[in-house]
Image (cartoon, rainbow, N blue to C red):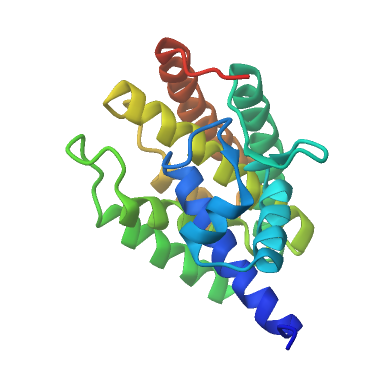
Amino acid sequence: MKPKTDDIRTGAQDVQNRLAADILAGRLTPGAKLKLADISLAYGSGMSPLREALSGLCGQGLVFQEGQRGFRVAPVSLGDLRDVIAMRTTLEVMALKASIDAGDVEWEAKILSAYHKLTRHTRTQAHLIDEPWEALHRAFHLNLIEACGSKRLFSYCAGLIGQFDRYRRISVLARGQHALLTPLDGKIVEATLDRDAETAGARLAQHIDESGRGVVEMFHESRLECA
């Protein structure tokens, strides 16, 4: 009996989420070949859901396909990191300004809740990769822009945030410490709730730029570039 389409889709999403988590956490290294038979066994997935999952990850920039030769984890490079930072800044600031124009009271409440949860969970050097903090930090950024009114823009931003987080995780693990940053989250929230789109956008751009410069420095010094 053939598996139902809904079952394949559900299985593919589960495998995609698990593969993405392993790529972001560095458990699947940049440039590593993803052999379908091995991945199918490791993740307990059939071939149809697995191929769909890998295609989805290609769309996120976490995996690439080598023609007919299969799939690999996306490589990392300084040039790609800088491109991710530049595109993330442009699109995320655009999405934030659109959200400020269109967002309602419920959107404001989500931002305040996400910010409160993030500030209550302090990141320390004792935990280089703190998964609860990672989830809270991502949720904060996504809540800021979720009222932008464009599913495509939101999706692009979410993908770029994920790609940047991958570089940050890889660099932090290689360096053995976090970059020191000026806390700007509260200032972004303040300007956002004041509906000051220009100030909020400038503060978000500053936040991404400062985070980006820290990751670029760690990445470059750790010589993590791969072909």
Residue closest to the eye, 160 or 101 = 160
61 left or right of 217? Answer: right
Give the position of the N terminus as an image quadrant.
bottom right
Picture mark count? 0
Spot the residue most to the left: 126
Q: Is residue 26 visible?
A: yes
Residue closest to the eye, 117 or 156 = 156
Residue closest to the eye, 9 or 182 = 9
Relative vertical location of residue 56 with respect to residue 183 in this rendering, above or below: below
Relative vertical location of residue 150 with respect to residue 187 in this rendering, above or below: below
The residue located at (76%, 35%) in the rendering is: 66
The residue located at (63%, 52%) in the rendering is: 36
Q: Which of the 4 image quarters holds residue 46? A: bottom right
Image x and y of residue 63, in percent = 65, 42
Give the position of the C terminus as an image quadrant.
top right
Q: Is residue 199 visible?
A: no
The residue located at (45%, 24%) in the rendering is: 215
Relative vertical location of residue 45 with respect to residue 215 in this rendering, above or below: below
Relative vertical location of residue 46 with respect to residue 38 in this rendering, above or below: below
Image x and y of residue 95, in percent = 69, 51
Q: Which of the 4 image quarters holds residue 187? A: top left
Residue closest to the eye, 64 or 184 = 64
31 left or right of 140? Answer: right
